[in-house]
Amino acid sequence: MLDVRSAMRRSAQFHADLPAVASLGRTLTYAQAWERGVRLANGLISLGVKPGDRVAVLEDNCIEAADFYLGSAIANAVRVPLYRRNSREAHLHMLTHTQCRVAVVSPEFAHEIEGLDAEIDGLQIVVRDEGYEAWLAAQSTEDPDPVVNLDDVFVIRHSAGTTGRAKGIAYTHRAWMSTTRDWFFMLPPVDVGDGCLHVGPISHGSGYLFLPIWLGGGVNHLAPKFDGEGFVDRLREDKIAYFFAVPTMVADIVARCGEEPQDLPDLKVVMISGAPISAKTALAGNTVFPGQMYQMYGQTEAVPVTFMGPKQWFREMPGSDPLRAAGRVTAFAELEIRDEDNATLPIGEEGEIAIRCEGQMTGIWDDEELSAARLKDGWVLTGDIGRLDANGYLYVIDRVDDMIISGGFNIWPAELEQVIVMLPGVREVVVFGVPHEKWGEAPHAVVVTDPGAELDEAGVIEACRERLGSYKKPVAVTFQTEALPRSIVGKIQRKVLRAAFWADQERRVAGS
């Protein structure tokens, strides 16, 4: 197996004169994109970056995002994506906890991390402002060609953990190449020139498609954001073959298309993941994109684990309910349902989903205790409650913990609770996910106030937005003066409060 850098370099050689990356009217061939990647690698090295050092990036999708993807791999540095919707406090944590040497930031986001180089020892910030192109052009075009081992760390992606702070999930070159293979095992193969439209950041789910498209000689189209207006026209005009979508995107496209089938002769795959999708949205999506809808399940820690295409998803299957499933167990993954003692349960019983695949994390970065808790004998304990049927379909029913998945983003209630409880007049607070028509689910806060407290919903929401970022703010706040319900050992019964909002729902996790 090749490492990521070597595999990308070979593809750049074989497809040198073909289009590789396109964004906002600019197109680069493979040779041009690779040369920019080499220049960026040498630029990072000139800043003191050595193989294995962590380098962060804060950006939207753009040509320069491809520079960084390629350049960090060429230098054998570890890519650490920062998330543009996060707060400054979250950026500080991610940079500190991964000991990043350099942070590269698009100018529109520079204010979010401005001054952090003074707070973090050894950090250098590179802003891709009007001087970036001249700086890049001044770097050497000689491939630095550092030794890359398959077990070197390639990327650290962040996910929430048991304390509510983001946890770095480390992937080696070996694991990332396995993930790349497994993502496309059940998809139509990439033909030379196939386009893949990335409207979600390549730091998230859509990024799993970047490498396989590059290796297959396709074109990665990088759009800064999703815009439902004219989206289908763009698929047609750019001859897009693949795109990744969270369920909320599908719902928006369906609404704009009036659930009418679209004539898209080049489209092969609409890849659905990131959050549960409702049966209603799935059926409507299959009408708009007939025979082109695929779904997978996995986590940042291990992906993909289940998969299904349109023929497995939209069919009658005795003993199964594919419309409400998250896919079937893939050929390269193992999946078990475990009880509270980590013992395997029989088919049909509900328990925690445990998964194992070649494309999974090596552990939680710099956290041996949490790594040991999440990895048991090589199996990842997902924290999701599920059921596996006799035909291999997986149903995700609930979560062991209280993670909220809103529009494809993970939100940890403890983060919001820690902010809200510090507001004047707040005695205690609990946050949980409730159904949301657009986002699938969203945070709802129940706040117990002191008598006479002057606190309103807008103030609570604004405090969370300011501290944590817009996407983590609650959509609603309930105020009360009576104490929150507690268990016999004194723990707040979050699930009791949450249950009332889900009484008329089929599942205890929502899709959009």
Image (tube, rainbow, N blue to C red):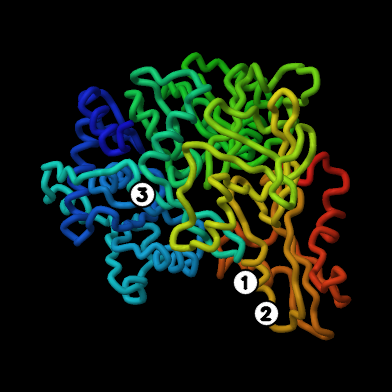
Relative horizontal placement of residue 118, taking residue 74 as reference (left or right): right
Please give the label number shown on residue 423. 2
**Nearer-N-terminus badge (3/2):** 3
Residue 348: give x, y in percent of width and height: 79, 33
Relative horizontal placement of residue 25, taking residue 496 as reference (left or right): left
Badge 3 vs badge 2, beta-carbon distance below 8 Å: no
What amino acid is labelled 2 in the image? Leu
- What residue is drawn where x is 80% and y is 75%? 448
Q: Residue 498 sits in which quadrant?
A: bottom right
Q: In which quadrant of the rendered image does the C terminus lie?
A: top right
- What residue is drawn where x is 39% and y is 55%? 58
Please give the label number shown on residue 153. 3
What amino acid is labelled 3 in the image? Val
Q: Of residues 163 and 43, which is closer to you in this image?
A: 163
- What residue is drawn where x is 69% and y is 49%? 342
Label 1: how many residues lie within 10 Å, few (<14), some (14-19) or many (20+)?
A: some
Q: In which quadrant of the rendered image does the N terminus lie?
A: top left
Q: On screen, 8 above or below 480?
A: above
Q: Residue furthest bottom?
A: 452
Would you name the residue on which mark 1 appears?
A: 463
Residue 414: give x, y in percent of width and height: 65, 66
What amino acid is labelled 1 in the image? Ala
Q: Of residues 227 and 450, which is closer to you in this image?
A: 450
Badge 2 vs badge 1, beta-carbon distance below 8 Å: yes
- How many discs appear? 3
Residue 119: give x, y in percent of width and height: 36, 76
Q: CA distance from mark 2 to mark 1?
A: 8 Å
Q: Nearer the viewer, mark 3 or mark 2?
A: 3
> In terms of secondary structure, where does tag 3 sit?
strand
